[in-house]
Amino acid sequence: MKDEFILHPPKGFIMKGQFAGRMANVQKSFIREILKVTQDPNVISFAGGLPNPDYFPVEPLRAAADKVLAQDGANALQYAPTLGYGPLRQFIAQRYAQMCHLDVNPDHILITNGSQQGLDLVAKILIDPGDEVILESPSYLGGIQAFSLYQPAFTTLTLQADGVDLDQLAAVAASPRAKLFYALPNFQNPSGITYSAAKRAAAAQILRDQNVFFIEDDPYRELRFLGEDLPTLTSTSRENSFLLGSFSKIVAPALRMGWIVTTPELLDKLVIVKQAADLHSNYITQRILHQYLLDNDLDAHISVIKAVYRRQRELMVAMLEECFPSDIQFTLPEGGMFLWVTLPESVSAMDLFNEAVARNVVFVPGAPFYVDGGGQNTLRLNFSNTDEAKIEVGMTRLAQALKEVMREA
Amino acid sequence: MKDEFILHPPKGFIMKGQFAGRMANVQKSFIREILKVTQDPNVISFAGGLPNPDYFPVEPLRAAADKVLAQDGANALQYAPTLGYGPLRQFIAQRYAQMCHLDVNPDHILITNGSQQGLDLVAKILIDPGDEVILESPSYLGGIQAFSLYQPAFTTLTLQADGVDLDQLAAVAASPRAKLFYALPNFQNPSGITYSAAKRAAAAQILRDQNVFFIEDDPYRELRFLGEDLPTLTSTSRENSFLLGSFSKIVAPALRMGWIVTTPELLDKLVIVKQAADLHSNYITQRILHQYLLDNDLDAHISVIKAVYRRQRELMVAMLEECFPSDIQFTLPEGGMFLWVTLPESVSAMDLFNEAVARNVVFVPGAPFYVDGGGQNTLRLNFSNTDEAKIEVGMTRLAQALKEVMREA
């Protein structure tokens, strides 16, 4: 009765209809493919969007896990409500009040598997094939991937130093099929750009006037190490907003703990698709995370992370200024985890990538962040998942690689 | 800058196109709505599909969590591969070899958030609107819900005491749009029915001959307390199979740990939609679960659960035989967590539900498990998430409720 695993189906074995139409144009994440390469300890990686594991609160989480399992283990291991653990939602609501004076009802929060699941669930309740989804250009690859599976038509907006071009937004939001605008207003992934307060309010007002939904994807908000906190777009318009947050960057990504804040009407629909997707998010982790948040000072923890990321970002900028050709441009993010570099028009970031890999340093070429072509001369550098010594060595290697590519070009 | 949360949008505020078409006919799970009622400690519930929390391995999981966080905390808290933790996939593969002589390559396993996510991911890669999905009748509500969001046409097969009607299966599988057959061959949820070995092989052969994919949803396999283990449908046909499993029933549901076994070609597509859905399943939980499995005897643990469930199932059957009218019918499951009761044609299970709630006992009426109507006189009884004292009291109340409803009818 032992079966042989058949690696390839017998010739001529074709399933009826094969895969669904939505699978036609979606590929595996290039970034996650790169991550596989970076397992080599000799490779210095500025590629992944990973936090610095040296600052994960390992011991406090260990104590929290122990406490929850000792005190309420059986309940914490059972099936649980779809919305998520009430006291955790309460904590998130209170934090919005403290952080940016946003009044959030805990019952209007859905706990998700990281904010990535938020993108999928929102897309699932909203997008019919052909609906228009408005993206920043460049935009977050995971968002593009999640939305693409619902077969929208993408429209893109130029990302300026202080946010999207508002005239462009007003024009595309007026389209009768405009359904959803996707924005990362703080320290955007990949560009590092932050919207000004004025642009936040103006963009939200345009979307409200045009009855277009928006996702405010805000996983980096608490990683601001320069400048001042700015209000959410959601504070200008609540009815059409999905505000997404995450503990991945401020506690730890392996927990897969994020959330969506929205209206009761929209939440009702999200609950239906969340039930169908996985019933509810990992409940023991919600309990452990909440215990950790109760017993520790999250602000103090985040301060440590921010100080580290600020130093690493400053060193990376200094290296770009000192060791790189003067005709490159780069953003100066006030927080988050990424710098965005624009090479001279004639230089291909993919050529640079190949030259860099040969020198044991990697980054993410910018092109995959553009849905409509372009960005061939751009690249994303991550400054969080590294240290100062690696930044010095890695950026020196990268500068050499760039000089080599520019010499050849 | 403090916002008021607006509970209802201003009148006339209508979003363009509103929700996606797929949301039109999908409701919240009736079962999960019932679960909210059962928080009252006076209510005896045979409703939920919950394991018995008295037998969760709380202390061993506590020790495993402590060990993982003490020994490898930083790695266990970082982003991780989409497929899941390699040694956990290895464990699952080895268990199939021991359990049912099925040769599984660990690299052909995807870790999911419970088997519920497996249903969603498979549906997402396969189903175009109008594709035919073949269901057992009755079928699992969570499956119906997951598939419905991809707008298939459902076809149903009569479930006999030893599995689906094979003539019906052969007829519907021959349809040019037949895409997917969904089966729970062991102790089906909701009916408790198990396929015979002959029907497994025959059904798989029909699906193979007709090039129809199938999901073999098998979360209860290890909860067999009577009779002998039977081979998977997958062992007869690999190329078109998605074999789903779960740790929810044998370790704990709050972990949200399940898996899909399939071919490399199908797995490639599943990885794309898994990345888009949530990047990867909770990694710290994968690590803790694997540590628990390494350090403990899972078979011994499952033996304890099975002995309890067998006693509880036998008591529930004895109560049905002794206290209930002789013109009801019920299944005699060899494992799992559910009994299925068929009342006389004229008696409504919904009327019985209302009468039962008034007497502080609940169950799940059968109608929601049928996609094409019918089953008005059926109901599902859970015998796992209870104890013998509650079964005696609850089944006595239920018998009284039934007598009352039948007297009125």
Image (cartoon, coloured by chain):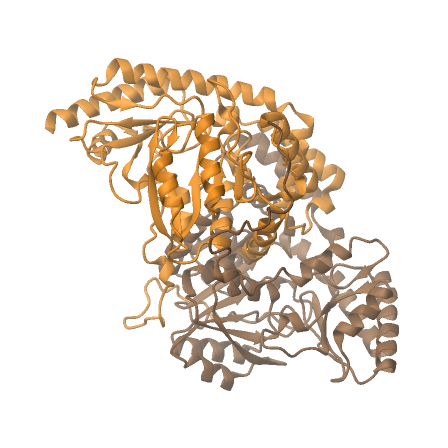
Chain colours: A brown, B orange
Q: Where in the figure is residue B115, as x and y percent of width and height?
A: 51, 41
Q: Position of residue A375 (x, y in %)?
A: 67, 78
Residue B10 locus on image (x, y percent): 31, 70
Query: Residue B46: which quarter of the image?
Result: top left
The single residue placed furthest to the left in the displayed view is B408
x%, y% of residue A213?
43, 70
Q: Does B273 sit above or below residue B222?
A: below
Q: Is residue A82 visible?
A: no
Q: Is residue B351 above or below residue B99?
A: below
The residue drawn where x is 57% and y is 54% is B269
- Between A283 and A68, the one nearer to me in the picture: A283
Front residue of B85/B33: it is B85
**Residue B132 appears in view:** yes
- Of A278 and B115, nearer the camera is B115
Image quadrant where one finds the C terminus of chain B: top left
> Taking B203 as reference, is B299 left or right?
right
Q: Residue at x 60, y 19 (%)?
A: B300
Q: Is residue A385 above or below residue B107?
A: below
- Seen at 45% across and 51% down, the residue is A274
Q: How many marks?
A: 0
Left or right: B343, with A62 as reference point: left
